[in-house]
């Protein structure tokens, strides 16, 4: 499963439990092609293809977080689309609510939908101006944090930065191990329902650590910029780093991997230095 | 990395020695993973017609005999001073390889239970002599600073190849391929063991520099000391947990499709690569952190892995389990295997390498396997369900994980309290 699907999976589980469905009976489709059966359980569609066959009636609810969902028959419950692709064919029916939060969809005019609601926070066809504004807001927020740290606690950033540059392999190893384990752990926690809030908190914590790593990259870049004040240099460096990350995302495959590698190293360096509270020193071999 | 420094300075004997060590140990471990673990079941059940339980008992016997043989060999190596003599060790390894060559060639002809048990006895004795002798070559071939990386190379290489070949088990075909590979290998070891190669003389002196392990500085770890036996107990626990869980998972059809024995090459390639990544990570961690962190990771990963499997048995539908499950399992196995290859030499000096390697490998590897096989058979007799079996394994893993964390915390408290009183 792709790491970026994990927050969506957690949200889907949260919505599922809020709707009163039995989460422990939910079926999660992570790959392959599947035809929906008449078993009474919720289905979460990940990187898979789900088809509700014509003339078939399934109980639902269906949560779509990725992949392809094609409804030809009847869904006797909610269909919630968080991401992915949804096609509702001519003659198909959704007897309950179709909730649209994100993703792409095609709904045939002859499809019968009892109720349709839309909560899409961002328009799917965002204009270039909206993209620039979103980036500016992100940069302003992270840049302000970088400014604060660079001005008041530069030692923290320096310690993490030193680990990124001097102990890249160790940082990458710890970052990868911690990221993979933590992501799996949070998904697992979400399934227990009781720990769902902890899982969400954990994901937020993870996001914070990744952002902290970005600020440190900004600090490292800022050292090479013509700013004398460390706070300003860190802020400018962070905005530059975020811009570079955005530019990297335009490169297919390589860009994604490089961005992911940078994040992983940043996470590892942050963890092994306790957020920069101490320098990382590898074990020395006694004489 | 010391080996890189040697390579840059064009000092080739240490580099060649390390490469030789990786080849020897990886080949030996690959043989153990494939022929001994996979082959014995095929040999006993499919060819000789023995029951599953009888073959399991045979494997337990192998583990027990190998343990006894390993300890006897290790103690003898140290008492006679052979553990400091590279030529003697190479000759012993040659003897083991030749014995296993004969065993491998004879395997397709095993047709009766008596032959099967005789094959097991000889195999156990040769394994018992081979493992501590090969591991004691660490002091001659591997710089102390690089032991984590070299151990990772051994673990990664052997698991990678074992996950990919053989795809379908056939004792005749595998025996033929192994014999073809072992003959040139035996000739090469024979040449090195002849005493007429200058390189061996150079390598034989390296134990003066490489001999004292990382944890024996400045004071050597004694065999009858608490730290040594604590580590033996911890690794015993790790092997026991792995073996007890594996013995049941490998019998469960749903999990076979996402395991080592999957018929899908892509799954096996994924597992092979995960082994390499896991071993490399363990190498980095072993080199840069204190050993307790690696133990904590191993036990934590095992706990988490079995938690995932237990969860999967309770909630999963009829489909294949996600590859995330074997991924974490493989990660944990690669971690502790790397730790196992690096730890015992690092707890030893040239005077204790034989005994410590034998006790470490023997108790943690062979004896734990023997006992876990016994427990698994007992569970089968009691008709313990898969879910309950995995829950027990998981409980053991969690117990060891929490126990270790508490132990480390208490030890730190004692150190602080002592500092306070002085």
Image (spheres, coloured by chain):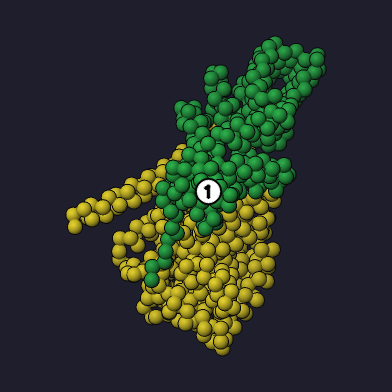
Q: Secondary structure at mark 1?
A: loop
In depth, the one of B334 and B413 nearer the eye is B413
- Judged left or right of residue B225, residue B129 is right
Q: Residue at x 65, y 68 (%)?
A: B178
Q: Quadrant of residue B46?
A: bottom right
Residue at image coords 56%, 30%: A10
Q: Please name the residue shown 53% across and 22% down the image.
A: A17
Counting other residues with Cα less than 10 Å from the Cα at mark 1, is it few (<14), some (14-19), or many (20 or more)?
few
Quadrant of res B180: bottom right
Residue B55: % across, % down? 53, 56
Q: Which residue is more in the foreground, B113 or B189? A: B189
Q: Position of residue A186 (x, y in %)?
A: 51, 36
Residue at horizontal 61%, vertical 23%?
A41
> x%, y% of residue A265?
55, 49
In the image, residue A256 sits, relative to residue B280, either above or below, namely: above
Residue that mark 1 sits on: A228
**Residue lying furthest bottom:** B196
The hue of chain B in the figure is yellow
Q: Which shade of the palette goes to chain A?
A: green
Q: Nearer the viewer, residue B346 or B136?
A: B346
Q: Residue lying at the far top in this picture: please name it.
A: A114
Task: Please say whether residue B39 is visible from this viewpoint.
Answer: no
Q: Is residue A40 left or right of residue A93?
A: left
| Placement of B298 over or under B28, stated as above or below | above
The number of callouts visible is 1
A158, above or below A112, in the image: below
Is A114 located above or below residue B32 in the figure? above
């Amino acid at each position: 499963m792709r790491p970026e699907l994990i927050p969506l999976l957690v949200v889907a589980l949260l919505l599922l439990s809020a709707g009163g469905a039995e989460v422990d009976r939910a079926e999660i489709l992570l790959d392959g092609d599947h035809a929906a059966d008449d078993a009474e359980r919720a289905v979460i569609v990940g990187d898979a293809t789900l088809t509700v066959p014509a003339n078939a009636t399934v109980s639902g609810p269906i949560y779509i977080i990725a992949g392809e969902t094609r409804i030809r028959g009847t869904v006797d419950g909610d269909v919630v689309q968080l991401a992915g692709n949804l096609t509702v064919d001519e003659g198909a029916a959704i007897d309950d609510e179709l909730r649209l939060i994100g993703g792409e969809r095609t709904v045939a005019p002859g499809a019968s939908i009892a109720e349709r609601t839309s909560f899409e926070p961002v328009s799917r066809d965002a204009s270039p101006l909206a993209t620039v504004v979103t980036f500016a807001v992100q940069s302003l927020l992270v840049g302000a944090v970088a400014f604060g740290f660079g001005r008041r606690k530069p030692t923290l950033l320096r310690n993490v930065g030193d680990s990124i540059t001097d102990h890249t392999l160790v940082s990458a190893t710890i970052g990868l191990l911690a990221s993979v384990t933590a992501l799996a752990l949070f998904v697992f926690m979400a399934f227990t329902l009781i720990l769902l809030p902890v899982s969400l908190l954990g994901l937020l914590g993870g996001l914070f650590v990744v952002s902290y790593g970005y600020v440190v990259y900004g600090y490292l870049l800022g050292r090479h910029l013509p700013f004398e004040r460390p706070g300003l240099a860190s802020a400018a460096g962070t905005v530059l780093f975020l811009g570079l990350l955005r530019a990297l995302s335009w490169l297919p495959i390589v860009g994604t991997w490089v961005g992911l590698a940078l994040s992983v190293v940043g996470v590892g360096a942050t963890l092994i230095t306790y957020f920069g509270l101490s320098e990382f020193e590898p074990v020395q071999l006694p004489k | 990395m010391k080996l890189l420094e040697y390579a840059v300075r064009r000092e080739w004997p240490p580099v060649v020695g390390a490469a030789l060590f990786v080849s020897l140990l990886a080949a030996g471990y690959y043989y153990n993973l494939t022929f001994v673990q996979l082959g014995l079941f095929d040999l006993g059940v499919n060819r000789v017609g023995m029951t599953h339980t009888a073959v399991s008992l045979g494997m337990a016997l192998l583990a027990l005999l190998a343990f006894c043989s390993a300890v006897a060999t290790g103690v003898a190596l140290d008492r006679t001073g052979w553990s400091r003599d590279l030529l003697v060790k190479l000759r012993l390894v040659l003897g083991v390889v030749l014995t296993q060559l004969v065993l491998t060639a004879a395997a397709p002809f095993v047709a009766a239970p008596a032959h099967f048990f005789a094959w097991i006895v000889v195999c156990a004795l040769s394994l018992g002599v081979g493992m501590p002798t090969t591991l004691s070559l660490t002091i001659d071939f591997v710089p102390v600073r690089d032991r984590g990386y070299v151990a990772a190379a051994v673990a990664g290489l052997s698991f990678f190849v074992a996950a990919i070949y053989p795809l379908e088990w056939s004792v005749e075909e595998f025996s033929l391929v192994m014999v073809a590979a072992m003959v040139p290998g035996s000739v090469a070891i024979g040449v090195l063991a002849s005493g007429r190669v200058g390189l061996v003389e150079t390598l034989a002196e390296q134990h003066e520099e490489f001999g004292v392990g990382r944890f024996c500085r400045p004071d050597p770890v004694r065999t009858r000391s608490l730290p040594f036996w604590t580590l033996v107990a911890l690794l015993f626990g790790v092997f026991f947990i792995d073996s007890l869980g594996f013995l049941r998972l490998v019998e469960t059809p749903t999990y076979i499709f996402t395991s080592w024995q999957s018929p899908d090459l892509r799954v096996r390639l994924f597992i092979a690569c995960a082994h390499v990544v896991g071993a490399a990570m363990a190498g980095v961690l072993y080199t840069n952190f204190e050993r307790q962190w690696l133990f904590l990771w191993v036990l934590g990963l095992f706990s988490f892995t079995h938690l995932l499997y237990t969860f999967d048995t309770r909630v999963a539908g009829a489909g294949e389990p996600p590859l995330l499950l074997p991924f974490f399992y493989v990660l944990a196995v690669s971690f502790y295997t790397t730790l196992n290859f690096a730890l015992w030499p690092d707890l030893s000096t040239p005077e204790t390498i034989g005994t410590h390697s034998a006790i470490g490998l023997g108790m943690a590897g062979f004896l734990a396997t023997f006992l876990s096989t016994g427990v698994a058979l007992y569970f089968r007799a009691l008709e313990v369900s898969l879910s309950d079996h995995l829950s027990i394994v998981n409980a053991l893993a969690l117990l060891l994980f929490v126990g270790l964390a508490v132990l480390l915390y208490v030890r730190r408290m004692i150190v602080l309290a002592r500092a306070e009183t002085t």
